[in-house]
Image (cartoon, rainbow, N blue to C red):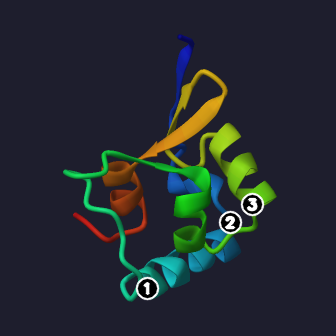
Amino acid sequence: MDTELAQPTTTEALDDHQEDTIRAAADAAVDVKFPDPETRPTMSVDEARPFYGLSRSSMFNAVRNGEVPAIRVGGRWLLPTAAVRRQLGLDP
């Protein structure tokens, strides 16, 4: 099984609009049930997409570019739930 880890880039790689979008999505995500990392250690790109406020193609581009933490398992991208929560500012 082929496993590849996409390293998230620093926030300097994001422009102001992208940072604002991520913050707004994180604020909105508080009202949506976000998976608990202890019971759901990973989530799919489509499950995480609403929390980032991105289209499907933009989300996959962000994953491939390393702007969103992700692990490639075979042909599938999985996002570590705890890393996504930290990136969105939901956890310290």
What residue is pinned by disc 2?
A: 15
Q: Helix or strand or loop: what does disc 3 sit on?
A: helix
Name the image quarter holding the C terminus: bottom left
Query: Is 55 above or below relative to 63?
Result: below
Query: Residue flagged by tag 1: what amino acid is it?
Result: Asp
Q: Are marks 3 and 1 in contact (CB under 8 Å)?
A: no
Q: Are marks 2 and 1 in contact (CB under 8 Å)?
A: no
Q: Residue at x 36, y 70 (%)?
A: 34
Sequence order check: which comes first, mark 3 or mark 1? 1
Depth-wise, is mark 2 or mark 1 nearer the camera?
1
Tell me which corner region of the image, top left, top right, bottom left or bottom right, holds residue 26.
bottom left
91 left or right of 84 in image: left
x then y, percent, for residue 86:
33, 59
Sequence order check: which comes first, mark 2 or mark 1? 2
What residue is pinned by disc 1?
A: 27
x then y, percent, for residue 14:
64, 59
Query: Residue flagged by tag 2: what amino acid is it?
Result: Asp
* Label 3 Cα neighbours within 10 Å, binned few <14 / some 14-19 / many ≥20: few
x then y, percent, for residue 70:
51, 39
Depth-wise, is mark 3 or mark 1 nearer the camera?
3
* Label 1 Cα neighbours within 10 Å, binned few <14 / some 14-19 / many ≥20: some
Q: Residue at x 54, y 44 (%)?
A: 9
Give whichever of 53, 8 is nearer the camera: 53
Q: Are marks 3 and 2 in contact (CB under 8 Å)?
A: no
Query: Residue flagged by tag 3: what amino acid is it?
Result: Arg
Tell me which corner region of the image, top left, top right, bottom left or bottom right, holds residue 32.
bottom left
How far apart are the two marked residues, 3 and 1, measured between alpha carbons?
A: 20 Å
62 left or right of 84 in image: right
What residue is pinned by disc 3?
A: 56
Query: Is 19 above or below relative to 67?
Result: below
* Label 2 Cα neighbours within 10 Å, binned few <14 / some 14-19 / many ≥20: few
